[in-house]
Amino acid sequence: MLRPGDHVVFPGDAYGGTYRLVHRVFGPWGVEHTPVDMTGTGDAQAALSGVRAAVRPGATKVVWVETPTNPLLGISDISALADLAHDAGALLVVDNTFATPYLQQPLALGADVVVHSTTKYVGGHSDVVGGALVVATGAQLPGGLGSPAGGTDVAGAVGFHQNSSGAVAGPFDAWLTLRGLKTLAVRMDRHQANAAAVAAFLDEHPGVTQVIYPGLASHPGHETAARQMSGFGGMVSFRTGGEAKALEVCSRTRVFTLAESLGGVESLVEHPGRMTHASVAGSALEVPDDLVRLSVGIEDVDDLLADLDRALS
Ligand SMILES: Cc1ncc(COP(=O)(O)O)c(C=O)c1O
């Protein structure tokens, strides 16, 4: 739907694959983007000023936000960004993959479109790849954009694109996703209880220089997260002070499996700089090389803590 010269304001800390799509695929089609720190590292006013400064009147059609972000778990204020996007005549699109609809409902906070990778928590068992777009009732395309289906209805335009371009789940994938969805609430309760325990444990560990988890009071987005989420989720990132140490930790865990992806019932560990976020190396979105990302599963929490303790020792 976007045309050459249209512009997207984009988080400076977004999932690497989303950045790759916007930068490497849509960029050559003439769609422009500006990465911005939408978290303000805890300073909500700084975050909003940055986004306001990046908006190009008449050209910006989408403000894209991911909260919490992958992998730095940055938090952005969805309702403030919705107001800002709407004042600029743009849509606010929220990638809600980390939070899930159980913990955060962006449409209720003013967003126009919500994106989920259903590969993650919604599917929940690391056995299906998929995605979902949820569109606010009545959302209209920003000024000047037309739907290939006719009119300016966002849902109609998205449905038309999906049907035309083939991004349609197979029946078995749809069945797996719906089966996973039935246990989303109980899984998330356990994921986040375990994640909170893991974050508290790492916070005390001498081999860890920083723990990043929105549930910790030390997280700069803690207050915003507490306001707009009903829980802090199952992802925890931490820094070790050196890349070699981070790689060593990733290779030494036994309960946490070294793997990309996230949100399944089993715990995973990865090194974003070398794995999920390798494609943003050298860009504004580059992640620290001593960062380790955990997708905390639903196993017995004592097994998880013992595994991390062993890997860090
Ligand atoms: C926040 C976020 N959005 C989108 C995606 C893309 O997901 P998929 O693997 O289903 O393409 C990911 C994958 O890690 C992600 O973390």
Image: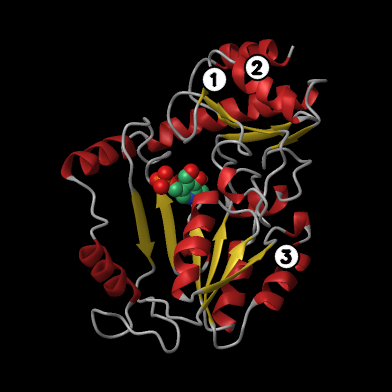
Determine whether, in the image, residue 213 is placed left or right of residue 46: left
Image location of residue 21, percent across then percent down:
47, 59
Rendered position, 116 above or below 109:
above
For discs 3 and 1, the disc positioned in front in the rendered view = 1
Q: Quadrant of residue 139?
A: bottom left
Q: Amino acid at mark 1?
A: Phe
Rendered position, 310 above or below 74:
above
Closest to the observer: 222 or 22? 22
Question: Which scheme is used to colour this image of the protein?
Answer: secondary structure
Which numbered circle lies on residue 20? none
Residue at the image point whose x is 46% and y is 81% from the top: 4
Q: Secondary structure at mark 1?
A: loop
Which residue was labeled with disc 1?
256
Residue at the image point whose x is 65% and y is 17% from the top: 308
Which residue was labeled with disc 2?
308
Image location of residue 255, percent across then percent down:
53, 15
Determine whether, in the image, residue 159 is placed left or right of residue 53: left
Q: Earlier in the sequence, mark 3 or mark 2?
A: 3
Which residue was labeled with disc 3?
47
Q: Earlier in the sequence, mark 3 or mark 1?
A: 3
Q: Secondary structure at mark 3?
A: helix
**Alpha-carbon span between mark 3 and mark 1:** 34 Å
Image location of residue 173, percent across then percent down:
24, 41
**Furthest residue to the left?**
171
Q: Amino acid at mark 2?
A: Leu
The C terminus: image quadrant: top right
Give the class, few, some or many, for how many residues have Cα within 10 Å of label 3's Cα (few <14, many ≥20).
many
Give the class, few, some or many, for how many residues have Cα within 10 Å of label 2's Cα (few <14, many ≥20).
many
Closest to the observer: 228 or 282? 282
Determine whether, in the image, residue 278 is placed left or right of residue 207: left
